[in-house]
Image: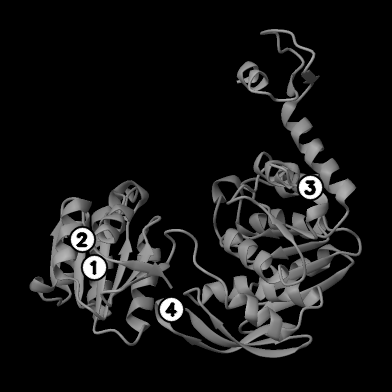
Amino acid sequence: FVESALTAGALAAVVKEDFAKFSDSRLIKVPDTLIALQQLASEVLRRWDRPVIGITGSAGKTTTKELTALVLSAKGQVHKSIGNLNNAYGLPLSILEMVSNGAKASDFDFAVLEMGMSTAGEIRRLCQIAPPNVGAVLNVKAVHLENFENIQGIANAKAELIEGLNPNGLAVLNADDPLVLPMQTRHLGKTITFALENPAEIRAINAQSLGVLGSKFRLITTKGQADVSFPLAGKHLLYNALIAAAIGDYFELSAETIAERLQLARPAYHRGELLKFTEGFLIVDDSYNSNPHALNEMVKMLAQTTGFSRKIVVAGEMLELGKTAVEMHQSCGKFIAENKIDLLVGVRALAQEIVNGAVSAGMAKENTYFASTVQEASQFLAENIKAKDLILIKGSRGVKTELIIDLLKEKFSWEKT
């Protein structure tokens, strides 16, 4: 792509020293193009010299990054990582967006950067590229275990963020996670903790689930307290909000201002989005992906949601479950029946086993429907949806349950909540 980029007007191209396809004065030859990319990004941050916030965790980094940027936007202009670009390639590309497409680094007051890893040493390298003034660790879970002897090895790899902090930097740590809290010994600077259960400087108390509509809680910070109506569903996301609150608190935002910013949060595209239709029904668009645990969690939140006449689950086939696939689909069906869902629509292939599991657990057969395609599911829903229905739509990426939502949008009028 080098020649076409230069033809299209690129000022220069960084290439390896052995690049020999053609010669051009605009070629900058280096021993390693990845290291050059990283050095370029690092130099942008060095000259910029404003607060860099690094965020890591086994799950939930992207949501935490988005919430932190949302809160800090009350204080100044925030640059944030693109999507989930959080590795040796993605991090420098995200940083270089600060000086791309007409932007200048001086336009921004904060940089909120996601830092991921699958092996030891990766976060240490990311901290060399983007030395953080604030490092936040959300959680440590048993992911990427194929690259570690045990979960403590994962914790040690996540702790590289805290070890990589500037000497006077801030560590933001989860006091409810026994693998995260001990990281406070990994640096000499200030630590601020957050928690739902244990003592901490930043806390959420009196949390009340509103099901898929989110939750309410009382936010405790070092500067005061405030009530929060948090639109993102799931107790686990309160931890993401508490990191954002802790960082906002550190940068002198009041509890009231933090609460106001958190109330503006919205789910990511196809990840729990609420779509309100003028015909009177509400769709929870969680069509991005699915697995048995995630499906059960969403069903549980659907069951907790009040104010609707019927609760409907549209569950697509779940892929890549191996030998236990039939059993896991049936188990999810049983869980749907146990949570008193009013109507179940299974979509494609193994989703038939979700329907079978629900019927075996006592759900009336006439309250279930199996559609072999998303088009068939869409047609069924279009003919059977009523006002005051609450509908969850979820399925594995390959099933494309988002097409059901697209087809319903064509038939009915809608708006985001």
Q: Nearer the viewer, residue 265 or 332?
A: 265
Of mark 3 and mark 1, the one earlier in the sequence is: 3
Which numbered disc, 1 or 2, marks the residue that appears first in the sequence?
A: 1
Disc 1 marks which residue? 333
Identify the element where label 1 is drawn. helix
The residue tagged 2 is 346
Give the mark nearer the N terminus: 3 vs 2. 3
Nearest-to-viewer mark from 3 and 2: 3
| Alpha carbons under labels 4 and 3: distance apart | 38 Å
**Mark 3 or mark 1, whichever is nearer to me:** 3
Q: Residue at x 33, y 55 (%)?
A: 402
Q: Residue at x 68, y 23 (%)?
A: 9
- Res. 362 image quadrant: bottom left
Q: Amino acid at mark 2?
A: Gly
Return the residue at label 4.
213
Between the C-alphas of marks 3 and 1, the distance is 52 Å
* Residue bearing mark 3: 104
Instruction: Say whether residue 286 is left or right of residue 311.
Output: right
Tell me: 77 left or right of 216: right
Question: Which mark is first along the chain, 1 or 4?
Answer: 4
Amino acid carrying label 4: it is Leu
Q: Is residue 120 visible?
A: yes
* Mark 3: few/some/many CA within 10 Å (<14, 14-19, 20+): some
Measure the C-alpha gap from mark 4 to mark 1. 23 Å
- Residue that protrudes farthest toward the left in the picture: 366
Q: Quadrant of residue 230?
A: bottom right
Which callout, 1 or 2, points to the residue nearer the camera?
A: 2
- The location of residue 148, given as percent across then percent down, is 61, 49
Q: Contact, CB < 8 Å: mark 1 with mark 2?
A: yes
Q: Badge 2: how crowded within 10 Å, few (<14), some, or many (20+)?
A: many
